Structure formats: structure tokens, C-alpha cells
Amino acid sequence: MRVSNPPSWGYSGDFSKETGAVADAVFMGTVPRALCGASLIMALGVLSFGQDQPSPAPDSTDTPPATDSAPQQGTFHDAFRFHAYADVDYLREDNPSEPARFDIGEIVLFGTATISPRLSALSEIVVDTDGATSVSNVPVNVERLLLQYRVSDYLKLEAGQYRTAIGYYSTAYLRGAWFQTAISRPRMFAFEEDGGILPLHTTGISASGLIPSGSLGLHYVAETGNARTWGTAGATPTGHDAVNIALFARPRAVPGLEIGVSDYHDRFAPVPGLTTDRQGVMAHVVYVANRFEFLNEGIAASLCYGPANATATFSGFYSQIGYRIGPNWGPYARVEKLSVHADPLFLNLVSTVATWRNMYTAGVRYDWNEHVAIKLEGGHEADWGVPHYYQLGAQIAFAF
């Protein structure tokens, strides 16, 4: 699975999602080995992920593992690592029913610890304050909680809750707003709790790695488990029948280019008693290097309820382009379109989730320093059954 980095197309003119080196160099601090036992418990309980690779193996002076089953101080092979991200937002819409407002946004906590040279654990916790009216209403989401075992470059195994490898954006960017260029995510990649139409999280097992392919740079992901469902009241999965297969290539001849496809299947009930078969195929062509960011993804998805022979189909895409001007400025623009066709059984249900038809967004990101980004963004949105409207947003995203 991909590893997210800050937008290094702005800092260095290149972009590597494979190593996580920029994020580690800037934000990760080392805790003494004497605290690693307690730190791992913290990582599994309340924190989250900074790097999807196990840290280097210890030198010969490390304390050997304990022989009994009780955890012992100093038995872990490397330091616990932690960093966090947050944002403050302002949004104004050309809509009398939506007053202008400030939001704290999200507080995202990441932690990871190495248990052995090949075994690591991570968690990613999101405190989502956006729109909450009181402290008691602030949700805490377990974004990821994983035990990872790296056999080799050709096989990495994960167990727990992970980001489903649907398309590119879902696994390429961490949840923190600091990572992504724009203020907003592409609408098709909205999270489930925000009404998103895609199952971006799965609890189960995953295998990923390289495919021997020379300069073509092929990678695979194979996943199975039970998925989160979209944000309608009462929506539930039916069991551990979610299956996703993804293939992507990173040709050595064109650094920064990635071309991929994924095929997802599961069964879920968008409302009680309506168990449907869901399928989604996504394709992407992405180039992020040499000061350019050019993201393109398309989707074709369907819901089918066999007893009534009823279906709903979704098709759409987004394209985002950005260019880095000097060391700090990064203007960007994005277009998104979605088409929905549904039989009467699904029509009202789908219209509450897939609300938008087309969106146009443009903005600029200014990196004040390596920890703080300031973004300004404007857009136009056309939804089903309501007049189109304009919106303006500002965001301060930071890492600490």
C-alpha cells in the first residue's frame, strides 16, 4: 500500500510516495528505547501512522527479546514515532441557509512502533471537530489500526483496519489536510462518515508488493474483509465479503508517473432489509514530479438488488492540476463530474448521497514554512434539484 508524504513537489521538485522520507525528516521525533514498551501501547490505543515501513533493525547492543510472554522494557527494536496534523478553516457559501463559519477541522494523530525487524504496528486516530456543536458531539474515528509484516519487497501483509486501495487518492494522502494540495478532497473520495459513496476503509487482511516486471514497475494489492458503508442512517455491511484487487505501474522511464486500476466488490444494506451487490471499477493516471501535480481518476460503479431487478449506476471523474512557483507558491485547479442513473427503488436513496453533478475548484497554496501551509480556494457547485452556488474557503493547515 502507498505511503503518504507532504507535497514534496513543492519543496524539492520531485515526489516519492514510497519512502515517506520527507515526513520522517521533518516531523518524526525519537523516544528513548526505555520508553518503547509504553509507547507501543499508546500507538495502538490512541495514536496513528507516520510511515508504513518498519524502521531499521537494531544494532547488536540492543537488549535481546524477553523469553516469557510478558512485555518487557527495552524489548522493541526501534523507537516509537509520533506526529500530528490539524487545520483551521473558514467557509462562505452563496447560500442563505449556510452561514459563513470558522471550523477547527480535524486533529489527526499518528504513531508507529517496530516490534521486530519485519513486524510493526500503527494506528491513525482522527478527532473530527468539523460541524460539532459541543464537546460531547465530537466524534473520534479510528482511521487505521494495523499490524504489518514485511516478508520482502514482493509481499507485505497487513491485518486490521486499512484504507481500501480503491483508486489513487484514497491511499496516496493521509487524512491530515497538510498533506493534500487543496483545501477539499475530490468529492468522490469523501469519507464514509461525511456521506461518501465509496468504501474507503476495510477491516480485514491485505497483501501488497512488487510484481517482477523490470522497468515497468508493477505493484499489486489484494484485500478482503468487511467495509464501512456510506453515510446514510442504518447502512450496514453484511459480513466479510468485501474483495478488492488493484494493479498499478510506475514506469522507471518516467519518474512520477503512475497508471493503475482497481476492482472492488461487496454486499451491504444501504437501508435495513435492502441487501445489495456493489461493484466499483476505478482507473487513474497520475504524474507528480518536476513541480507538476496532475491527478486524473475515473469511476464506474453499480448497486444491484436482485429480488426486484433494480440497479443504480454511477460514473464520473475528477482532474486536478497544480504547478509549483518558486519555493512557496502552488496554484491549482480541479474539475469533477458525476452521472447517476437509478431505478425507482434506489432513486431517493442515491440522491441523498451522490448529491453533486459537477464542481469546479481553483485555489492557491502558500507554504509558510515546513510546518504551516495557508490555502485560499474558490469553487462553483451544481447539485441535483437545487440552484448552483459559489463558495469560498480559507485554511491554515499545520503539523506539530
Image (cartoon, rainbow, N blue to C red):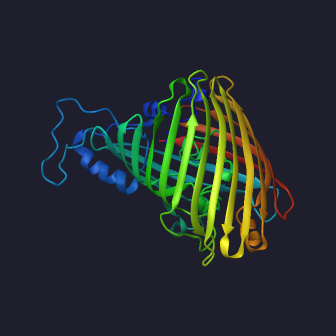
Give the residue at the far left of this rendering: 67
> In percent of the image, x 65 and y 47: which residue is there?
282
Q: Position of residue 44 (x, y in %)?
A: 35, 54
Q: Nearer the viewer, residue 341 or 235?
A: 341
Q: Nearer the viewer, residue 103 or 249?
A: 249
**Does residue 4 appear in the picture of this structure?**
no
Q: Quadrant of residue 62?
A: top left
Q: Position of residue 31 (x, y in %)?
A: 30, 40
> In percent of the image, x 67 and y 71: which residue is there?
305
**Does residue 38 appear in the picture of this structure?**
yes
Give the residue at the far bottom of this rendering: 273
Q: Position of residue 143 (x, y in %)?
A: 49, 55
Q: How many marks?
A: 0
> In percent of the image, x 75 and y 54: which residue is there?
92
Q: Nearer the viewer, residue 286 or 88?
A: 286
Give the residue at the far right of this rendering: 387
User: In this image, 361 relative to 4: left or right?
Assistant: right
Q: Quadrant of residue 172?
A: top right
Q: Nearer the viewer, residue 395 or 380?
A: 380
Q: Position of residue 275 (x, y in %)?
A: 61, 72
Residue 345 to residue 400: above or below: below
